[in-house]
């Protein structure tokens, strides 16, 4: 099969596109004919070797954890899916090696849910990792109808989902971003706040009664500054700063969860959540997709398309 891979850590220049062995399908996995994947910052951070201390790596590495595609072969114990089913998945393995930037991937059933029927392959591929991260972060802090939640980095890939999910749950959402993204945040259902110096005062002005919960998708000092406005200490989660645990909060490293993924599919099909697609690159241009992500300031997600998107 054709795949993007690298044989040593480095910058996007180490990515190659060529032939790799077809994946083996285990008893509780399915072989997926990939239509699209997407780029997450963790992909190029792994490629650069930044996570070598915590994630075992087997070279050559095919990057990518997101997938949207069609089941072509279920494993012998699989009853949840059959050939022809359209699926999405967060295919994170216990080791780094066999990813989703490829024509085919063997995906464990625990990583998959059916694809939303009302979005394209590229849009569908942007859902799993960031959608699950947002969903699990909001669940961790117990966001409920009528509450006020602050989303840090609302214009990023995870933030765009968190705003829409929390809004769908009936919460009032404040979100930080640069001023150029304020109209975009409003379009998602959030009340925008400029990040950086003076944020605590801006929060006090927007929510004088305080915040019910805070979710942080960027790190830095802003999430710390927002804690003084929390009505209940500890209702804070971060995907970027493990020090949140010292404040009684939750550090989130997203986990595959088919029930959560199905809940996201249903929100998308209901029109409550819409994937924000920043752009697409064909498989052969994965290095350019990495560079675009590394440059930052991407609104939404970058997708990697594989083959004919009309199939």
Image (cartoon, rainbow, N blue to C red):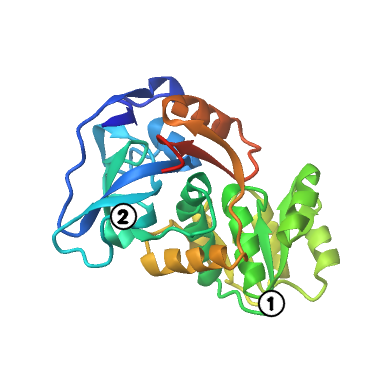
- The image quadrant that residue 186 belongs to is bottom right
Residue 1 in the image: above or below residue 92:
above
Instruction: Locate residue 264 relative to residue 83 in the image: left or right.
Output: right
| Quadrant holding the C terminus | top left
Q: Residue furthest front?
A: 311
Position of residue 281 in the picture relative to residue 218 (left or right): left
| Residue at image mark 1 | 147
Q: Which mark is residue 93?
A: none
| Residue position marked by numbered label 2 in the rendering | 84
Q: Nearer the viewer, residue 55 or 103?
A: 103
Q: Residue furthest right?
A: 205
What is the CA distance from the residue labelled 2 to the residue labelled 1? 42 Å
Q: Position of residue 172 (x, y in %)?
A: 72, 71
Quick one: SS at disc 2? Answer: loop
Residue placed most toward the observer, 170 or 114: 114
Which quadrant does the N terminus fall into? top left
Q: In front: 6, or 206?
A: 6
């Amino acid at each position: 099969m054709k795949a993007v891979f690298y044989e040593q850590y480095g910058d996007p220049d180490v990515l190659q596109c060529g032939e790799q062995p077809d994946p083996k399908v285990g008893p509780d996995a399915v072989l997926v004919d990939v239509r699209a994947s997407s780029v997450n910052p963790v992909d190029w951070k792994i490629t650069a070797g930044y996570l070598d201390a915590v994630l075992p790596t087997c070279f050559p590495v095919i990057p990518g954890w997101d997938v949207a595609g069609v089941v072509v072969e279920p494993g012998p114990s699989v009853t949840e899916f059959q050939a022809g089913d359209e699926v999405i998945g967060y295919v994170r393995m216990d080791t780094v090696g066999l990813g989703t930037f490829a024509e085919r991937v063997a995906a464990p059933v625990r990583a998959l849910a059916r694809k939303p029927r009302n979005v394209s392959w590229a849009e569908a591929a942007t859902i799993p990792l960031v959608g699950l991260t947002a969903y699990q972060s909001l669940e961790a802090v117990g966001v409920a109808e009528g509450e006020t939640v602050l989303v840090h980095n609302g214009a990023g890939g995870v933030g765009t989902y968190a705003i829409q999910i929390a809004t769908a749950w009936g919460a009032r959402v404040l979100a930080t971003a640069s001023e150029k993204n304020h109209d975009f945040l409003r379009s998602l259902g959030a009340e925008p706040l400029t990040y950086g110096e003076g944020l605590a005062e801006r929060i006090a002005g927007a929510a004088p009664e305080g915040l019910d919960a805070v979710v942080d998708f960027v790190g830095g000092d802003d999430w710390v500054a927002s804690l003084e406005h929390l009505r209940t200490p500890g209702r804070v989660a971060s995907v970027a700063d493990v020090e949140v645990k010292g404040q009684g909060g939750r550090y989130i490293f997203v986990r595959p969860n088919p029930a959560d993924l199905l809940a996201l599919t249903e929100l998308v099909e209901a029109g409550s959540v819409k994937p924000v697609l920043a752009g697409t690159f064909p498989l052969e241009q994965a290095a350019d997709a990495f560079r675009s992500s590394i440059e930052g300031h991407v609104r939404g997600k970058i997708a990697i398309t594989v083959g004919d998107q009309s199939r």
